[in-house]
Amino acid sequence: MPPPKDLDPYADPRAFYGAELRRLREAAGLSQNELGERAFCSGTYIGLFEAGERRPQLEISRALDELLGSGEHLQRLCRLAQTSKVAGYFADAAELQRRASSIGSFTSMLVPGLLQTAAYARALTRSAHPFAATDFIEGHVRTRMERASLLDSPTAPVLWVVIHEAGLLLPVGGRTVMAEQLSHLAEQAESRPRVVTQVLPFSAGAHPCLHASMTLMQFTDAPAVVYTEAAYNGQLVEEPLLVENYRSAYDLARAAALSPEASLDRIASAAKEFATR
């Protein structure tokens, strides 16, 4: 589990939550493992909360308040720490992406968020929220573009993306937007050595990832996790056996995909088709 580390409890709400949890746990004379056992989670999970490396959850905070006799203290801090620019169901995954050493992504119909252009992200957001105000749409677009700055970090993770060929052909936002998006996708793969893109062709037929989009995040100091997403919800998968199943499915999809070089040719071809229609 993460060793205790000194945090500035006033750095942000998550750090304050972690500092308070550690204070209450130590006052109760419990180790991280002991508290985890009583809360039906692992000591590692408690350690991640205390280190400010995981966004606290209301259900576990309620259990911890009961165990530590702290009223609703941790629950109130949890609500404060859960404030996020991204959708609540994606907030944990967004935070984990920043810590990951590698990110493996499979998408069946869309370009992954970290590689989207503003126009493409805008068209997607508008399709999901057709009656939303412009400020709402633009806020989502800005947040997505801010997340993409992760790839500019000196410690950027290796991003290995597998996109089904269908994702190159779906005209999100129209021909001009798609031509720009696909050109951007190719440029990112060519200019960033830590970004690898593959296309899974229609000729591959059925495959284990056919029914889901998934993101596999691996870390140097923690077990791998998987994030799966649908239209209006997502799920973080941490159970080791399920994570391994997703990892196997991702590896099979990657093996069935075109080589990175052939994939760039297919992306460029699709971009040209949209530009010249």
Image (cartoon, grey):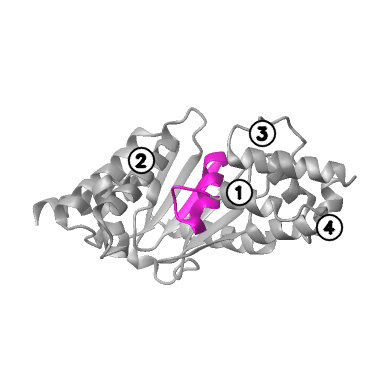
Task: Identify the residue shown where x is 24% and y is 59%.
Answer: 172
Q: Nearer the viewer, mark 2 or mark 4?
A: 4
Q: Amino acid at mark 2?
A: Ala
Q: CA distance from mark 3 to mark 4?
A: 25 Å
Q: Which of pointers 2 and 4 lies earlier in the amino acid sequence?
A: 4
Q: Which residues are magenta?
A: 83-105
- Report the residue marked by disc 3: 9
Q: Amino acid at mark 1?
A: Arg
Q: Which of pointers 2 and 1 lies earlier in the amino acid sequence?
A: 1
Instruction: Based on the picture, tell me whether residue 102 belongs to the magenta stretch.
Output: yes
Q: Position of residue 101 (x, y in %)?
A: 57, 39
Q: Which of pointers 2 and 3 lies earlier in the amino acid sequence?
A: 3
Q: Is residue 62 left or right of residue 199?
A: right
Residue 218 seen from this side = yes
Q: Nearer the viewer, residue 203 or 190?
A: 190
State the SS at label 2: helix
Q: Nearer the viewer, mark 2 or mark 3?
A: 3
Neighbourhood count class around disc 4 (C-alpha, 10 Å): few under 14, some 14–19, many 20 upward: few
Q: On residue 55, which mark appears?
A: 1
- Report the residue marked by disc 4: 37
Q: Is residue 189 left or right of residue 61?
A: left
Q: CA distance from mark 2 to mark 4?
A: 45 Å
Q: Nearer the viewer, mark 1 or mark 3?
A: 3
Looking at the image, do the residues carrying marks 1 and 3 touch, with CB atoms under 8 Å apart? Answer: no
Looking at the image, do the residues carrying marks 3 and 4 touch, with CB atoms under 8 Å apart? Answer: no
Q: Amino acid at mark 4?
A: Glu
Q: CA distance from mark 2 to mark 1?
A: 31 Å
Neighbourhood count class around disc 1 (C-alpha, 10 Å): few under 14, some 14–19, many 20 upward: many
- Toward the right, the furthest residue is 29
Residue 266 seen from this side = no
